[in-house]
Amino acid sequence: MKCIKKLVALTLAAVLALAMLTACDGSSNVPNATEQAEQMVSNINAVRTENGLEALKTNPTATDVAAKMVDLYVKRYQNEITEEEYKTKRNELRNIQVEGKHNYGSMTMDDKVSTENFLKKDAWTKMYDNEKKMYDTEKYSLAFGSRGEYIGAAVKTMSNGKMVAIIVFY
């Protein structure tokens, strides 16, 4: 019996030693917020170009506006600001121009609409197809409107783990 216990202990020690030698680079398969925002823009542009529309250009000012809007959304969600403060500051951000162009809209996505789904091109393709059916014009929506030239996007994970993304169009 003592021999079996020693053999089991030796086997467990060997397994633990091998587990410690297993390499791990510490990286994650989950993209960071910047990569997530870039992925959404890339997916929107892929669907746009596949359907004969020009790709939107990313712009640092538009991206900054989107980042500030995400922060503002999170503050409202966490009751750090009132609804009135939120609307006032959001309108101020909407009034910022990019390369002389006015903001013509924004999209806000949160966990209620599965934000992670919007990291996939398929979600934007479905949205384009659905909006194409809803609107019988060349200007389908914010993401696919023919008047757009610039885009900015930002993604943030809140302290409760929920994700929010905002995309702005100019």
Image (cartoon, rainbow, N blue to C red):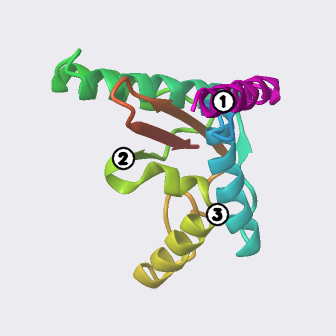
53 in relation to 42, above or below: below
Q: Quadrant of residue 14?
A: top right
N-terminal of the pair, mark 3 or mark 2, is: 2
Which image quadrant: the C terminus? top right
User: Where is mark 2, residue-wise?
Assistant: 111
N-terminal of the pair, mark 1 or mark 3, is: 1
Q: Is residue 164 left or right of residue 63?
A: left
| Foreground disc of the pair 1, 2 | 1
Give the residue displayed 53% in from the left and 38% down from the top.
102
Give the residue displayed 66% in from the left and 43% down from the top.
150
Q: Is residue 61 left or right of residue 163?
A: right
Q: Residue furthest top?
A: 80
Give the residue displayed 39% in from the left and 32% down from the top.
161
Counting every numbered tag in the picture gives 3
Which image quadrant: the N terminus? top right
Secondary structure category for the residue under label 1: helix
Q: Which span is picked out in magenta? A: 1-27
In-front residue for pair 64/122: 122
Using the image, tell me which numbered label, if any, was put on residue 3: 1
Q: Residues within 10 Å of mark 1 (few under 14, many from 20)?
A: few
